[in-house]
Amino acid sequence: MSKKKGKKTMTIIISSIGLLLIIAVASLFIISGVFQSPKYLEPWGKKYSQKFEDPRIRLIAHGLLAANGHNMQPWKIRLDRDNPLAFYLYADSDRLTNEVDPFARQMMVTQGTFLEYVKIAGDELGYKSTVELFPQGDYDEQQLLESMNTTPVAKITLTKDNPLSSPLYDPIFLPDTNRVAYQSTKLTSEQIDQLINLTTDMNMAIKIFQDKENVDKLGSYAMKAATIEAGVTRVMKESEIIFRANEYQKNKFRYGFSVEGQGTSGLMRHLMQGLVTLFPSMNSGQAAADMFIKSAQTSVDNTPAYAMIITKDNSRSSQIQSGMLYSKLTLTAHRLGFVVQPLSQALEEYPEMKEPYNSIHHDYASDGGTIQVLVRLGKPTKEVPQSMRRDVMDLIE
């Protein structure tokens, strides 16, 4: 009888533990928001822009998908009241990331990524887009925030035209950044030429590096910069503030970071979201710093090539134009079967990053140019989810 009782007791204990685990996992899924409809993904649908009759809004809905710093989507639109085929792009001063981007350089690059997506979508939908940068004059750098609010980055004027199919249109709907490990496959000389020749502007260049010496050196810069950034509390806090832990927060804010950024998807996404919601310390303080460094190391260890965009000067117009070129680079890479991930830390201009910033420019832009973009480049080992996007009407004033 004692053996039978012992077995029965053990069965009850195991069943109870199993039931508790099921309840715990189910609770994590509920906390994650598993039953929430992901409205933050709606702009990624190809039919999303078709809801709007105004061709300007249709193109703006495409621009919304462009790569942007910290996924802040810092774009503000004013439609021209007199011309139904014109609108103005402003940098949204409420969406600056001052700690990592104190001079708003990345903010301006982000304006350019948007403009290029608009142009490509315009060709596809039958609207030629003419972009005029700073149509009302340059920013007053001494009053930068006020200038951003009153001075447009660009005027975009549309002209009805025959639709022109672009090989870069379909890649617009793919995630712009892939942070997972890449395959060891290198680019062919023909593929390198296609990327380098995306610009004919003498003031701007794309450079590709896939020899061991430069891959190792750039990887070293990336790790040094990541380690510095992880140790700067105010910088890490800036990222922590815009982390969206679950589906409820992602639907509410629709910008910033989430667990998808590291390629987490499916059931694991909801488990992680539930855990981070219950235990916010998993994504703050030393835990966040360690995770950031570990992720950077994985990226660097699995990168066959790097790409840079270098401009001869660092004017606001050059920053914007480098963003337009970056969109071309990203979309062309997608078309060739490659993906990219920006490694912006070594290019950031806050005081603690001064040494790697100066060193990388000494090594790769010794003629006084500015490295506007540094990305890792390769074939992905897995696909990643799309990131949050705001509703297009939220951009329009």
Image: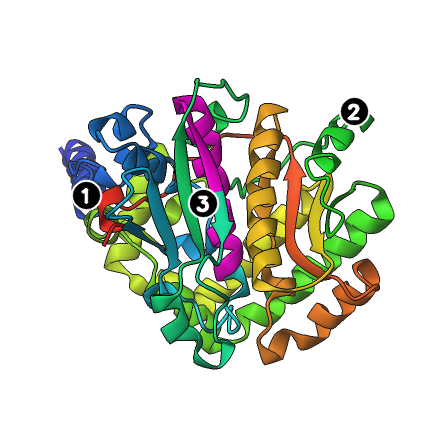
Amino acid carrying label 1: it is Gly
* Residue marked by disc 3: 114
- Judge whether residue 208 can be spotted in this image: yes
Amino acid carrying label 3: it is Phe
Name which of mark 1 and mark 2 comes first in the sequence: 1
- Judge whether residue 391 can be spotted in this image: no
Rendered image: mark on residue 190: 2
**Residue at figure coordinates x 48%, y 70% from the top left:** 139
Whether residue 334 is in magenta: the answer is no
Vertical order, 369 against 88 (above or below): below
Segment colored magenta:
107-130
**Residue at figure coordinates x 48%, y 58% from the top left:** 134
Label 1 packing within 10 angstroms: few (<14), some (14-19), many (20+): many
**Residue at figure coordinates x 79%, y 26% from the top left:** 188
Q: Verify CB contact (< 8 Å) between mark 1 and mark 2.
A: no
Element type at marker 2? Answer: helix
* Residue marked by disc 1: 33
Is 357 situated left or right of 56 in this image?
right
Q: Quadrant of the C terminus?
A: bottom left
User: Residue 291 in the image: x percent, y percent?
Assistant: 50, 58
